[in-house]
Image (spheres, rainbow, N blue to C red):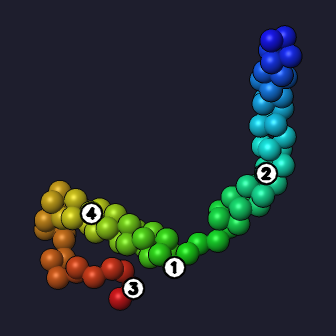
Amino acid sequence: MRKVMMAGAVLLATSGCVRTAWNVATLPVKAVGKTADLMTTSPRERDEKYVRKLRKEQERRDKECRKHPETCDQGQRSPAGY
């Protein structure tokens, strides 16, 4: 009975060490993956960012048109530069 209790105590005591060792071993891989993800932009992310920018500009223009309708050019609905 005593051996079983000792074996259980050893397993409980080393479970934290195993978990910590695993985290330390996988940390460089996770760090490199996160860095690569932050430094690269996929075409989808680039498109989403561009569309967000266009919507924000359009909302700003619409807000200005509501505030000052006399200075607003109603025909201008395309993004700047096009």
Residue displayed at 27% across by 63% down: 59
Q: Position of residue 47 (x, y in %)?
A: 44, 76
Q: Which residue is mark 4?
A: 59
Q: Residues within 10 Å of mark 2 (few under 14, many from 20)?
A: few
Report the Cα–Cα distance between label 4 and label 3. Answer: 17 Å
First in residue order: circle 2 vs circle 1:
2
On screen, residue 22 above or below 65: above
Q: Position of residue 37 (x, y in %)?
A: 65, 65
| Residue 81: numbered disc | 3
Amino acid of disc 1: Pro
Q: Residues within 10 Å of mark 1 (few under 14, many from 20)?
A: few
SS assignment at label 4: helix
SS assignment at label 3: loop
First in residue order: circle 4 vs circle 3:
4
Badge 3 vs badge 1, beta-carbon distance below 8 Å: no
Residue displayed at 19% across by 71% down: 72
SS assignment at label 1: helix
Report the Cα–Cα distance between label 1 and label 4. Answer: 24 Å
Report the Cα–Cα distance between label 4 and label 2. Answer: 45 Å
Q: Residues within 10 Å of mark 3 (few under 14, many from 20)?
A: few
The quadrant holding residue 29 is: bottom right
Q: Which residue is mark 1?
A: 43
Badge 2 vs badge 1, beta-carbon distance below 8 Å: no
